[in-house]
Image (cartoon, coloured by chain):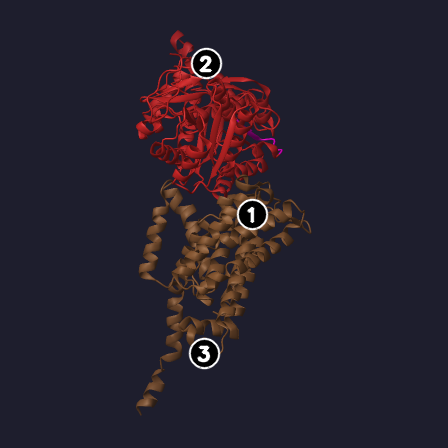
Chain colours: A red, B brown
C-alpha cells in the first residue's frame, strides 16, 4: 500500500470509529406546543409561539451537527377541550411541552401533561390557582405578582395619591386587580374599584363614575387589548382630570403603538422591552436577529416570553441528556428546579410549585411612536412623561 | 333493517373501545364529539317534540356542570351521583326559564339565549359558590367502579355512550307515547290541539325540563372529564350553537341524526380539515354545512337512508308482473 492510500485507509478507519461515538452523543429533543392559533386568544398565542420557534431555531444553530430540537405545534383553538386533545395527540411523540395561553386553557392542558409524565412550561397563565395544584411537572416563568409589583412600584414612585382600578372580571385580571389594590392600599393610596364584564364595549358609564365620583389621580386598567381600546376611547371623550393612565399586559407593545398611535400616547403598561427593540447583551441581540430572520419584524414581549420559557426548557433537557437521564421520569423537572437563570426577562428560579418567585416586570410608556421603558430606574431607557394622558400635553417628570 | 340500531349500539360498546382505546387522542376527540351529540340530542328533543328552537342550551349545560362540580369537589358527593344531581339542577333551573314558554319562534330562542347570559353573569358574581371568574380547577375525575377506571378515555367514552343511549331511549319513549302524538299534533296547530283538550303549555314545559335534564347531565359529564370550569367556558355560546348545527346537519327530526351530525362535523373538522388547513379550517366546515343545507335540507341521516327507504317503498308499492297482468285481465 502506498503512502496516500495508507493515509486514506487510516482516515477512513478513524472516521468509522468516530461515527458511532458521534451518534451516541447526538440527541434529538422533541418539544410539543399546544397554543391558540385561532379563536379569542389567537393573537397572543401566535406571538408567544413565534418566540417558541425562535428558541428552537437558535438551539439548532448553536448545536448544529450535534443535537437537534424539533417542535410540533397544535392549535388549541382557544378551547380547553381541544387543548387537552392536543396534549394527548402530541404526548407519545414529544418529551416536554412549551406553550399554552390563558389560565383556563393551561389548567386542563397541564393536568393532561402531568398524567403523561411530561414537563409543561408556560408563560401564558398567571392565575395563582395554577401553582396550587400540586403538579410536579408544571412550570411558569411569570405570575400575577410580578405585574402588580411593577405597577404599584411605579405609581408609588410617582407619588400618586388616589387610583381608580377598572378591571375585567376574567380570572387573571381580577386577581391582578386585587393584588394592585392591596399594594396601593398598603402604601396609603386611596383606591376605587370598578369591575366590568369582558363582553362590554361601552365604557363611558364607568368613566363617568370615575370622573364625577372618584376623581382619582390615576386610572389603572387591568384587562386585555379590546378593553384598553374601549376604555381609552371612552376616556378621550369623557376626559377625566387624571395625571396618568396605566395598565398591565398587552398594552405597552409595538402593536398597540402602531395600531392606535394617538389613543396610546403617554399610556403606561408592563413591558419587558422598549419598542423599537434595543438589545444590548449578545443573547438578546442574537434573539432579535433570528426573530427578524424568521418573521421579518421586531420581537414583542410575548415573543420574548415564548423564547425564554423554551430556552430554559431546552437547556434543562440538554443537562438531563448529558447526565444520561433525559427519558427518566422527573429528570427534566429536577433540572429546571436546580438553577437560577439570568434571562431576557430577568432572573428565573423555579420553586417547588413550579412558580418563578423572582419575576418582576418593568413599565413602559408610549411616547411618540416608541415604547420607552420608564420603570424601574435601572432598566429605564428614558424618563417618564408625567402628568400626561392621551388627551393632555405632557411634560417630562425629571424636568 | 330493524336490527340495525341494536347492531350499531353493540358495535359502539364492543368494537370501538378495542379498536380505538389505545389512542388517547382519537378517543378524546370521540368523547368530545359525543358530548356535543348529547347536547344536540337534548336540543333536538325540545325542537322536534316541543316545537321550540332554543339558542341557549348552554344555560342548562353550564348549570349542570357547575352543580355537579361543586357537589363533587366541595361536598364530596360521588361523581356519578353528582352528575345525576347536575341533571336535576339543570331541570330545576329550567323552571326559571318557563316564562319564556309564552313566547314563540325567534322570541323564545332569544329569551333562552338571554337566560344563558344571565346564568353566566350569576356564575361570575357568585364567587363564594362558583369561584367567580377564576372558576374551579381540579374537579374530581370520573371514578373507578369495581376496578374499572372511568377516568381514562375508554371509561369516559363508555359513560357518554351510555348517557346517549339512555337519552335516545327516553326520546323514543316520549315520541312513541300519546304525549308524543299530542306534541306532533301541536306542531301542526297548537290552537287546534288546545281545543281538543291537549294541555299544550304543560307538555311544552315537560319537554323543556326533560331537555334541560339531558343537557345538564352532559354538562356535568364534561366538567368531570375536562376537570375545569369557568363561567365563560361553562356558558359559552359554542355549547348553544355547535349542537344546533350538528342536529340540523345530521337531521334533527330523526332520533340518531343529531348524534351522527355531531360525530361527523366534529371528527371531520378535527381529523381532516384541521390537518389540511391548520388555521381557518372552520371555513371548510362552513362550506360542508352550506352544501348539506342546499342538497339535503332534512339532514345527513335522511340523505343516507333515502335509498333504503325508496327500495322499501318500491318493494311494498310496486305490483309484481303477475299481479299487473291479473289486474289487466
**Residue at the limit of the structure toward the front, as seen here:** A212
Do residues under tags 1 and 2 come within 8 Å of each other at their CB atoms?
A: no
Does A135 appear in magenta? Answer: yes
The residue marked by circle 1 belongs to what chain?
A: B
Residue B201: image location, x then y, percent: 49, 69
Snapshot quadrant of residue A54 = top left
**Residue range of the region highlighted in magenta in the rendering:** A134-140
**Residue at the limit of the structure toward the bottom, as seen here:** B329
Q: What residue is at 44 percent from the left and 72 percent from the top?
A: B186
Snapshot quadrant of residue B218 = bottom right
| Comparing labels 1 and 2, the label whose residue is closer to the camera | 2
Residue toward you, A139 or A71: A139
Q: Is residue B126 visible?
A: yes
Mark 3 and mark 2: Cα distance apart in space: 82 Å
- Image quarter where the C terminus of chain B lies is bottom left
Residue toward you, B196 or A38: B196
Do residues under tags 1 and 3 come within 8 Å of each other at their CB atoms?
A: no
The residue marked by circle 3 belongs to what chain?
A: B
- In the depicted structure, whether residue A208 falls above or below residue A27: below
| Residue that badge 3 annotates | B195
| Residue that badge 1 annotates | B223
Q: Earlier in the sequence, mark 1 or mark 3?
A: 3
What secondary structure is found at the residue carrying circle 1? helix
| Residue that badge 2 annotates | A377
What secondary structure is found at the residue carrying circle 2? helix
Mark 1 and mark 3: Cα distance apart in space: 44 Å
Amino acid at each position: 500500500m502506498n503512502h496516500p492510500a495508507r493515509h486514506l485507509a487510516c482516515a477512513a478507519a478513524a472516521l468509522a470509529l468516530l461515527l458511532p461515538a458521534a451518534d451516541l452523543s447526538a440527541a434529538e429533543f422533541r418539544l410539543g406546543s399546544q397554543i391558540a392559533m385561532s379563536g379569542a386568544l389567537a393573537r397572543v398565542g401566535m406571538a408567544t409561539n413565534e418566540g417558541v420557534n425562535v428558541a428552537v431555531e437558535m438551539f439548532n444553530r448553536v448545536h448544529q451537527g450535534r443535537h437537534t430540537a424539533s417542535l410540533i405545534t397544535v392549535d388549541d383553538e382557544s378551547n380547553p377541550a381541544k387543548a387537552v386533545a392536543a396534549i394527548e395527540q402530541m404526548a407519545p411523540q414529544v418529551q416536554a411541552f412549551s406553550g399554552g395561553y390563558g389560565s383556563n386553557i393551561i389548567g386542563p392542558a397541564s393536568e393532561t401533561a402531568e398524567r403523561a409524565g411530561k414537563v409543561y412550561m408556560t408563560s401564558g397563565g398567571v392565575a395563582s390557582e395554577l401553582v396550587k395544584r400540586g403538579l410536579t411537572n408544571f412550570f411558569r416563568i411569570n405570575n400575577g405578582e410580578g405585574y402588580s409589583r411593577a405597577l404599584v412600584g411605579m405609581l408609588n414612585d410617582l407619588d400618586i395619591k388616589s387610583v381608580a382600578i377598572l378591571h375585567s372580571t376574567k380570572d387573571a385580571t381580577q386577581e391582578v386587580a386585587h393584588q394592585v389594590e392591596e399594594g396601593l392600599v398598603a402604601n396609603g393610596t386611596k383606591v376605587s374599584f370598578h369591575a366590568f364584564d369582558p363582553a362590554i364595549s361601552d365604557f363611558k358609564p364607568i368613566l363617568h363614575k370615575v370622573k364625577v365620583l372618584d376623581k382619582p389621580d390615576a386610572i389603572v386598567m387591568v384587562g386585555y387589548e379590546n378593553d384598553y381600546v374601549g376604555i381609552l376611547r371612552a376616556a378621550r371623550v369623557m376626559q377625566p382630570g387624571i395625571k396618568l393612565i396605566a395598565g398591565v399586559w398587552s398594552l405597552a407593545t409595538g402593536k398597540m403603538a402602531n395600531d392606535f398611535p394617538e389613543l396610546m400616547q403617554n399610556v403606561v403598561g408592563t413591558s419587558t422591552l422598549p419598542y423599537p427593540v434595543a438589545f444590548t447583551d449578545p443573547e438578546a441581540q442574537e434573539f432579535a436577529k433570528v426573530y427578524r430572520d424568521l418573521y421579518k419584524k421586531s420581537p414583542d414581549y410575548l415573543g420574548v416570553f415564548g423564547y425564554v420559557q423554551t430556552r430554559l426548557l431546552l437547556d434543562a433537557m440538554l443537562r438531563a441528556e448529558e447526565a444520561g437521564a433525559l427519558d427518566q421520569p422527573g429528570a427534566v423537572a429536577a433540572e429546571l428546579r436546580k438553577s437560577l437563570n439570568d434571562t431576557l426577562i430577568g432572573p428565573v428560579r423555579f420553586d417547588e410549585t413550579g412558580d418563578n418567585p423572582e419575576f418582576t416586570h418593568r413599565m413602559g410608556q408610549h411616547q411618540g411612536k416608541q415604547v420607552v421603558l420608564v420603570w424601574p430606574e435601572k432598566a429605564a431607557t428614558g424618563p417618564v412623561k408625567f402628568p400626561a394622558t392621551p388627551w393632555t400635553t405632557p411634560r417630562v417628570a425629571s424636568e | 333493517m330493524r336490527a340495525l340500531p341494536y347492531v350499531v349500539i353493540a358495535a359502539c360498546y364492543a368494537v370501538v373501545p378495542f379498536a380505538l382505546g389505545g389512542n388517547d387522542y382519537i378517543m378524546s376527540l370521540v368523547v368530545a364529539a359525543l358530548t356535543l351529540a348529547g347536547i344536540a340530542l337534548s336540543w333536538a328533543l325540545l325542537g322536534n317534540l316541543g316545537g321550540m328552537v332554543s339558542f341557549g342550551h348552554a344555560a342548562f349545560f353550564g348549570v349542570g356542570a357547575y352543580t355537579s362540580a361543586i357537589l363533587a369537589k366541595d361536598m364530596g358527593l360521588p361523581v356519578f351521583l353528582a352528575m345525576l344531581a347536575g341533571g336535576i339542577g339543570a331541570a330545576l333551573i329550567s323552571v326559571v326559564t318557563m316564562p319564556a314558554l309564552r313566547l314563540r319562534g325567534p322570541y323564545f330562542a332569544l329569551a333562552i339565549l338571554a337566560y344563558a347570559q344571565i346564568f353566566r353573569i350569576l356564575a361570575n358574581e357568585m364567587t363564594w359558590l362558583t369561584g367567580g371568574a377564576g372558576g374551579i380547577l381540579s374537579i374530581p375525575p370520573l371514578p373507578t367502579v369495581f376496578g374499572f377506571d372511568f377516568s381514562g378515555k375508554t371509561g369516559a367514552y363508555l359513560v357518554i355512550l351510555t348517557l346517549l343511549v339512555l337519552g335516545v331511549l327516553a326520546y323514543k319513549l316520549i315520541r312513541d307515547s300519546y304525549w308524543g302524538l299530542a306534541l306532533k299534533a301541536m306542531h301542526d296547530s297548537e290552537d287546534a290541539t288546545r281545543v281538543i283538550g291537549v294541555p299544550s303549555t304543560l307538555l311544552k314545559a315537560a319537554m323543556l325540563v326533560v331537555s334541560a335534564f339531558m343537557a345538564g347531565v352532559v354538562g356535568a359529564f364534561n366538567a368531570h372529564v375536562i376537570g375545569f370550569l369557568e363561567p365563560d367556558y361553562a356558558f359559552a355560546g359554542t355549547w348553544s350553537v355547535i349542537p344546533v348545527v350538528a342536529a340540523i346537519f345530521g337531521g334533527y327530526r330523526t332520533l340518531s341524526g343529531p348524534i351522527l351530525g355531531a360525530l361527523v362535523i366534529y371528527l371531520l373538522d378535527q381529523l381532516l380539515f384541521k390537518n389540511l388547513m391548520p388555521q381557518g379550517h372552520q371555513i371548510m366546515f362552513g362550506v360542508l354545512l352550506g352544501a348539506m343545507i342546499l342538497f339535503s335540507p332534512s339532514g345527513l341521516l335522511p340523505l343516507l337512508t333515502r335509498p333504503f327507504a325508496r327500495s322499501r317503498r318500491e318493494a311494498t308499492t310496486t305490483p309484481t308482473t303477475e299481479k299487473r297482468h291479473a289486474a289487466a285481465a
